[in-house]
Image (cartoon, rainbow, N blue to C red):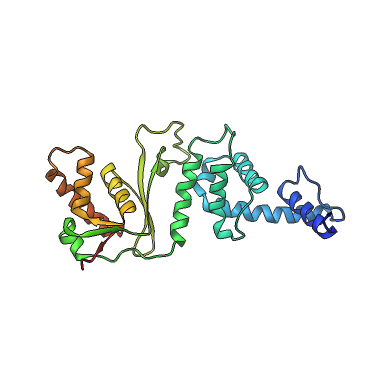
Amino acid sequence: MSKPNFQETQYAFAAYIREPFRNPAPTGVKPERAAMYRELFFNNINNFIATSFPVLKTILDQAHWSDLVEDFFAHHRSATPYFSDFAEEFLAFLRDERTGHPQDPPFLLELAHYEWVELALEIAKGEAPLPSLALEKNPLECIISLSNLVWPLAYRFPVQRICQAYQPQEPLTEPTLLAVYRDREDTVHFVELNPPTYRLLQILETQGCIQAKECVLQIAEELRVTDPSSILGFGADMIRDLGNRGIIGEIPKD
């Protein structure tokens, strides 16, 4: 069954807006008017993506950036009509569709993810845990949980350092471990973690809540520390700091 004329015009206009160099404007539409609409659509998307991924835009030259956004605009089928979700759509495009482009830096996807996380946490629902006197005085005796506004992340590249002057072409020998979190003042922060701290956040992410001392001893066992008591002081300081930042909170005992 053939489409009604107005639908044919809509499909033709959409195809032209996505790829004007491959698809002609609909019959009866003035070329200058079609070009104006196309420019408005593309500029809206381009500006939003540029605002969402400022570091990525800065490190790519103008032609490379334009090619990247044109590729997204032409080929990605977004699952949302909301501009607030377009950054996640762009990330999905980079992850699932943008392949075979040797000019893209090897850290492209990781850097984009790192920038997207900040946006995601800014609008995420929830509140950071309240301050806890028990976490300050006796951190190891507390039952602790991870804030729902914290993401423990591991990257192959040092994404937090990438800029115009520093663009590594090979991943580091050890992963870059980060926590991205929103604090009690609703400000998003990035903090670099050592492996034991990252592991603690992983355990909390998996188990929900656990006694702090038990968690620290589990990490000591995994690290094959011969004298677990030697890590308890370090663990207490670590948990106290995470509590002060609002990364973890105390679960009151019944």
State the residue lying farthest toward the bottom: 254
Q: Is residue 75 left or right of residue 193?
A: right
> Relative to residue 10, is residue 194 depicted above or below?
above
The residue located at (49%, 46%) in the rendering is 112
Furthest residue in direction right, as rendered: 28
- In the picture, measured across the screen, residue 83 lies left or right of residue 214, that is right
The residue at the point 71 percent across, 49 percent down is 18
> Quadrant of the rendered structure where residue 199 is?
top left
| Quarter of the image with the N terminus in it | bottom right
User: In the rendering, at what x and y percent does residue 57 appear?
Assistant: 54, 45
Determine the image quadrant of residue 225: top left
| Residue lying at 56% horizontally and 51% vertically, measured from the top left | 89
User: Vertically, is 89 above or below 103?
Assistant: below
Residue 96 falls left or right of residue 207: right
Q: Position of residue 117 (x, y in %)?
A: 45, 52
- List x then y, in percent, for residue 105: 52, 35
Q: Which quarter of the image is occupied by the C terminus?
A: bottom left
